[in-house]
Image (cartoon, rainbow, N blue to C red):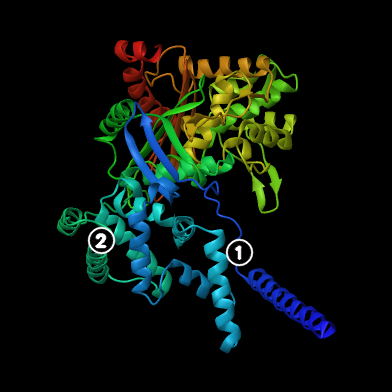
């Protein structure tokens, strides 16, 4: 008898242990197969991202929000809202949020007793390991509504421009209904969500979750959306795109942080200079276009840029950097600085005469302006009087490849080293050429030229300026600048009224299609281009000295007036 009792005891103990082990095995398998739900973690290091641009002086021109994220914390959701969320779940086929997770985060089996058993085990597992509020936060924080809206906190920022915790009760319940309907059936129209919101509030009252006063105030509240819209001045959008490209070149991922960018453009100054240029164009040929760039070469800042508006450049501003035109003789200083680097001196002799050069397409034989040739003359005169043949001879002596390399070190690329290259046959923008001349102004040092005055990332100032690089000797650049001052004193710009001590260079392309002038006078490089978009000739007076240099003189008159000059030195 005792033996039978002992055997029954051992057998029952074994069966109990077996059932327990089976239970634990099934439970472990079930949890193992579940979708990731291991730990409640709120901080996933997600941040809102925004790019804000303003001109020098604080004029805001652009604000773009790229991501809306604001993860709720335990203090952001109270017991009433947990009840509200469960009511919304119940209206979508679930008893509560635990039932939602059982159906969606754990594997569904074939059916029958096993499935029922595992559902009960799942509920037991969730109740044992998670609080209702934790599951609610886990659910609400991890929904991705779109590529740039994450979590109910982000949705609140997008729809109301306010944090979830700052909303009224009705708006919060509306967002809860929005969220559940979004995950379950892809969303619901405002009218349907509004009705459901009122239904949830009523059930919260009848279930004694809120009192009548709170209920009455909630249902009488009008939901006021303040859906986020980009703030932007349409006129400046091309400028914004230009700044974005500069940020990308400097490896700034402006779509993943809160960036505030202050631009270098001085709007009041820019408006005044643009007005001067437009008045200068009045009375000229109809349809004549122009553009300028003003760079403070000491700071490397672009303080003014402008282009006349046309069908091709409707905003005007983008003409300054998008338009590519042959540069003519404003390219020539690059030839002379290359020659001076090789040991040539300004008062060495060179023969200026018409020559013929064999090229694949035949014979290349450029003329000098007005068929004027100086014969044996000083090297410097080739730059002062813009002698084409003397310049090509000097370029060949220095090496066309060397001239092209100098141009690329100064910031122009690509430059093709063929015979017409020294005369400016390669096309570049007004901005390209202005940046190149800042190297001359800085005595051979290439300084980063930027539209960005300052930038902060999440409130912290960051430095994106590149280091200064010497690309030519101070001596050779100084010799070039001395020649350029004589361009203004008694060379091709002598009749233009450009201010004394300006180092300048005129540029004219074939058939008078483009007129250029650059002036260097502390602390500015000022570059002006004049021409027609369809590239027809401006006539014999369409030279850099006759058409572009006087425009620079007009701008200088304002720029260096007593008032402006005082402001410049502050």
Of discs 2 and 1, which sits in the foreground?
2
Residue closer to the observer: 421 or 27: 27
Give residue 465's position: percent from left, percent from top: 57, 29
Asked if residue 22 lies left or right of residue 6, the reply is left
**Who comes first in sequence, dot 2 or dot 1?**
1
What is the secondary structure assignment of the residue under circle 2? loop
Q: Is 313 left, or right, of 469 in this rendering?
A: left
Query: Alpha-carbon neighbours of circle 2 within 10 Å: few (<14), some, or many (≥20)?
Result: few
In the rendered image, residue 31, in percent from the top left (x then y), is placed at: 64, 69
Q: Quadrant of residue 494?
A: top left
Q: Nearer the viewer, residue 520 or 346?
A: 520
Residue 495 versus residue 237: which sits nearer the camera?
237
Question: Eyeballing the image, is 537 above or below 355?
Answer: below
Where residue 5 appears, as percent x and y from the top left, is 79, 82
Query: Can you tell which mark lies on residue 36?
Result: 1
Secondary structure at numbered mark 1: loop
Which residue was labeled with disc 2?
208
Residue 518 visible in rendering: yes
Label placed on residue 228:
none
The answer to whether residue 163 shows anywhere in this view is no
Residue visible at 55% across and 54% down in the picture: 40
């Amino acid at each position: 008898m005792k033996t039978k009792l002992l055997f029954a005891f051992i057998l029952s103990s074994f069966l109990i242990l077996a059932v327990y082990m089976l239970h634990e095995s099934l439970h472990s398998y079930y949890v193992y197969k579940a979708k990731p739900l291991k730990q409640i973690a709120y901080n996933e290091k997600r941040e809102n991202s925004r790019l804000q641009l303003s001109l020098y002086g604080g004029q805001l021109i652009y604000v773009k929000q790229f991501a809306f994220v604001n993860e709720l914390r335990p203090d952001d959701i109270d017991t009433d809202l947990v009840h509200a969320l469960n009511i919304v779940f119940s209206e979508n086929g679930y008893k509560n949020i635990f039932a939602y997770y059982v159906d969606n985060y754990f594997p569904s089996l074939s059916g029958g007793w096993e499935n029922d058993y595992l559902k009960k085990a799942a509920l037991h597992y969730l109740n044992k390991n998670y609080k209702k509020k934790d599951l609610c936060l886990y659910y609400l924080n991890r929904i991705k509504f779109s590529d740039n809206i994450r979590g109910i906190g982000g949705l609140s920022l997008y729809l109301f421009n306010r944090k979830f915790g700052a909303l009224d009760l009705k708006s919060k319940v509306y967002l809860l209904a929005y969220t559940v309907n979004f995950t379950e059936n892809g969303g619901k129209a405002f009218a349907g969500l509004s009705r459901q919101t009122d239904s949830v509030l009523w059930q919260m009252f009848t279930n004694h979750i809120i009192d009548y006063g709170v209920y009455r105030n909630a249902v009488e509240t009008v939901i006021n959306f303040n859906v986020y819209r980009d703030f932007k001045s349409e006129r400046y959008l091309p400028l914004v795109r230009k700044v974005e490209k500069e940020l990308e070149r400097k490896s700034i991922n402006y779509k993943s942080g809160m960036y505030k960018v202050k631009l270098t453009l001085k709007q009041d100054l820019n408006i005044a200079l643009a007005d001067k240029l437009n008045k200068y164009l009045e009375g000229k040929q109809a349809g004549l276009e122009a553009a300028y760039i003003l760079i403070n070469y000491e700071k490397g800042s672009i303080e003014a840029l402008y282009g006349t508006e046309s069908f091709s450049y409707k905003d005007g501003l983008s003409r300054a950097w998008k338009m590519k035109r042959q540069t003519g003789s404003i390219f020539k200083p690059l030839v002379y600085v290359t020659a001076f680097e090789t040991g040539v001196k300004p008062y060495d002799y060179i023969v200026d005469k018409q020559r013929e050069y064999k090229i694949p397409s035949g014979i290349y034989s450029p003329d000098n302006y007005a068929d004027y040739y100086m014969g044996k003359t000083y090297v410097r005169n080739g730059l002062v009087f813009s002698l084409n043949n003397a310049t090509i001879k000097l370029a060949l002596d220095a090496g066309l490849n060397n001239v092209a390399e100098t141009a690329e070190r100064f910031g122009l690329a690509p430059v093709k080293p063929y015979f017409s290259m020294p005369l400016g046959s390669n096309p570049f923008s007004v901005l390209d050429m202005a940046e190149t001349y800042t190297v001359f102004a800085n005595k051979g040092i290439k300084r980063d030229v930027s539209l960005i005055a300052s930038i902060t990332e999440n409130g912290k100032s960051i430095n994106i300026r590149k280091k200064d690089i010497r690309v030519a000797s101070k001596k050779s650049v100084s010799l070039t600048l001395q020649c350029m001052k004589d361009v203004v004193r008694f060379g091709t710009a002598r009749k233009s009224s450009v201010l004394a001590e300006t180092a300048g260079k005129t540029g004219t392309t074939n058939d008078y299609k483009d007129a250029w002038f650059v002036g260097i006078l502390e602390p500015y490089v000022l570059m002006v281009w004049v021409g027609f978009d369809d590239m027809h000739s401006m006539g014999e007076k369409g030279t850099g000295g006759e058409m572009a240099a006087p425009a620079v003189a007009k701008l200088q008159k304002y720029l260096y007036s007593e008032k402006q000059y005082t402001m410049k030195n502050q």
